[in-house]
Image: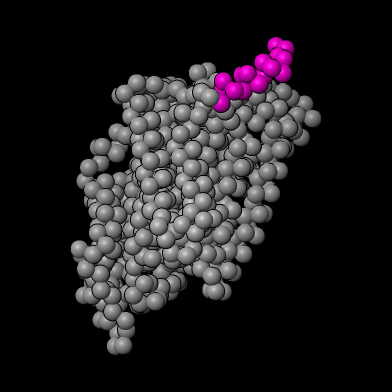
């Protein structure tokens, strides 16, 4: 169809006008960033503290996202709407992660107010970086084009580099930021080259052209690509595989998966605990949202076994499962030898990324394994929905239990000026609220009932068992995952031993955090949901079931 220049401009204007209301939470974050910059420019932070401006903007953005989610639940829509000529996608999955990321941002901002990092002078700059990184994560969750995928990851990463090195005058902080930048630049270059290979071979970089068709354009191109044959096609196939793996490398860097994890322990140790807590949860949530969208764009949301390239994508799923098992094993084993609690939690973060990746691997195997017996398309898609549901449940619990652990590390640091595990000796006698809340978070991280972490791991392992019935390699992934859960118990219990059973060393700085203090209220608000999500399982389970069903275009039950 031939379009005049005036018609193109008119269509772009109409599309932008229709997209802006759907993009309102992100626009609210952009407005908050501008407000923070103006506060800094006019030295108005004495009258308008950066923390207050950031919190107000985040609350408004979170409210807009909550209204959008309510509209989806009321209307019962299962599809989505393309924004900005298809570069972004507006659907319940996008809105769910908007709420997840903005609520987490609000908790992190609250934590910085309680702990006093950053100081008043640097607060506007810090919150600009924090909100800017979150904006990139919001784009990761709604990305509908490979170019937006790259831009969103870079928008997330670049402010993160600065936040890791934000503690001025600390050599460890500057060194950690430099390592983070170097690894990030390498991963970005690899990912961009992979995107160019995929777009060049398939002739498209769009994940979904028309949400109503339920067929991502990359999937359509891959179906046609899989029908080709001949020596030239074999070379193109190898190139396609290389391109997909390169894109996965960029995502693996954000998830700190083995062997792309090297930046994580150093960055967490050198950065403030507040920044470490932010990176450990927010970047994982956004990266998994992006990974799920990318994988579904490859295999299609309603593909069944036997379609072209199904064997290739099933092998990629198995490979992801092996990477997940190795990542969990490495993270747990490396955590044993750590004396710095932030470094231990960094390796714990790596291990949990491995657990969550198992759900994505299971989804890939289920959607692409050869059809056998009575395995229908509906049953296969329902099993894939269980995988996504398990991932979303795990992320929701991980939100609270990991942030709670990092928050307590920050509060203890403020009073002992130390982040060594040995300095937690006698904490239960000095600040019982911190010790009990840390116990809740650590026990949930292990996966012991009745805490939320148990049900998160149970949901993920159930999805792995579902995939193991289709590919026996996944049984090995399941066994490794269960064994790692048992192994992780020992290094978490080492912290518990210091807190509850070791005496306070002579001359050690004491920790005084009353229950009714600001810090006491904060740790209670963060830690108690970990217990609540283990008791009231049905509510979160039904919510994640709906979101997973929406993503796969299933009717809600």
- The residue range painted magenta reads 1-16
Query: Relative to residue 177, is residue 381 depicted above or below?
Result: above
Q: Is residue 147 visible?
A: yes
Quarter of the view holding residue 69: top left
Q: Please report the residue visible at 48 percent of the width from the left and 48 percent of the height from the top.
A: 35
Q: Position of residue 453 (x, y in %)?
A: 32, 51
Left or right: 409 as drawn, with respect to 297 = left
241 or 295, nearer to the observer: 295
Residue located farthest toward the top when viewing the structure as drawn: 1
The percent position of residue 330, horizontal first and vertical second, equals: 49, 60
Left or right: 416 as drawn, with respect to 118? left
Image coords of residue 239 (percent x, y)? 72, 38
Q: Main secondary structure of the magenta part?
A: helix
Q: Nearer the viewer, residue 449 or 55?
A: 55
Q: Is residue 307 visible to us here?
A: no
Residue at 26% x, 77% y: name it: 426
């Amino acid at each position: 169809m031939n379009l005049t220049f005036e018609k193109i401009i008119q269509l772009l204007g109409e599309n932008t006008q229709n997209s802006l209301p759907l993009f309102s939470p992100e626009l609210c974050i952009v407005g908050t960033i501008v407000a923070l910059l103006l506060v800094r420019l006019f030295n108005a932070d004495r009258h308008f503290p950066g923390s207050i401006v950031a919190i107000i903007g985040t609350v408004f953005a979170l409210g807009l996202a909550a209204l959008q989610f309510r509209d989806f639940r009321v209307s019962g829509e299962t599809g989505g709407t393309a924004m900005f000529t298809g570069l972004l996608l507006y659907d319940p999955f996008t809105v769910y992660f908007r709420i997840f990321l903005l609520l987490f941002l609000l908790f992190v901002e609250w934590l910085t107010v309680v702990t006093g990092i950053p100081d008043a002078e640097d607060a506007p700059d810090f919150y600009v970086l924090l909100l800017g990184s979150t904006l990139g994560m919001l784009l990761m969750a709604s990305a509908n084009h490979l170019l937006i995928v790259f831009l969103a990851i870079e928008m997330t990463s670049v402010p993160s580099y600065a936040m890791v090195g934000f503690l001025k005058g600390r050599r460890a902080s500057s060194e950690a930021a430099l390592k983070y930048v170097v690894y990030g630049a390498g991963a970005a270059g690899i990912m961009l080259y992979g995107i160019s290979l995929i777009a060049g071979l398939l002739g498209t970089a769009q994940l979904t052209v028309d949400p109503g068709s339920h067929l991502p354009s990359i999937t359509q191109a891959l179906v046609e690509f899989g029908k080709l044959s001949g020596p030239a096609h074999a070379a193109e196939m190898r190139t396609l595989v290389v391109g997909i793996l390169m894109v996965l490398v960029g995502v693996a860097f954000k998830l700190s998966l083995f062997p792309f994890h090297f930046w994580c322990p150093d960055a967490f140790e050198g950065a403030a605990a507040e920044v470490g807590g932010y990176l450990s949860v927010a970047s994982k949530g956004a990266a998994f949202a992006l990974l799920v969208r990318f994988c579904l764009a490859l295999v299609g949301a309603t593909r069944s076994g036997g379609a072209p390239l199904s064997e290739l994508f099933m092998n990629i799923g198995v490979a992801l499962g092996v990477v997940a098992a190795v990542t969990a094993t490495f993270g747990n084993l490396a955590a044993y030898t750590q004396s710095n609690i932030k470094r231990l939690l960094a390796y714990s973060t790596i291990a949990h990324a491995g657990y969550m990746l198992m759900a994505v691997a299971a989804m890939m195997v289920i959607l692409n394994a050869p059809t056998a017996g009575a395995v229908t398309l509906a049953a296969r898609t329902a099993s894939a929905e269980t995988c996504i549901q398990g991932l979303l449940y795990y992320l929701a619990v991980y939100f609270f239990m990991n942030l709670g652990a990092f928050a307590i590390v920050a509060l203890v640091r403020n009073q002992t000026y130390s982040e060594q595990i040995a300095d937690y000796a006698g904490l239960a006698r000095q600040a019982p609220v911190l010790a009990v809340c840390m116990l809740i978070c650590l026990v949930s991280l292990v996966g012991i009932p009745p805490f939320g972490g148990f049900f998160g791991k149970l949901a993920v392992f159930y999805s792995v068992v579902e995939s193991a019935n289709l590919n026996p390699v996944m049984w090995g992934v399941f066994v490794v995952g269960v064994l790692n859960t048992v192994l992780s118990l020992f290094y978490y219990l080492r912290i518990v031993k210091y807190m509850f059973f070791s005496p306070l060393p002579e001359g050690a700085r004491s920790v005084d955090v009353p229950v009714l203090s600001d810090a006491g209220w904060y740790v209670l608000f963060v830690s108690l949901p970990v217990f609540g999500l283990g008791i009231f399982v049905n509510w979160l389970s039904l919510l994640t079931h709906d979101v997973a069903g929406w993503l796969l275009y299933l009717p809600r039950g």
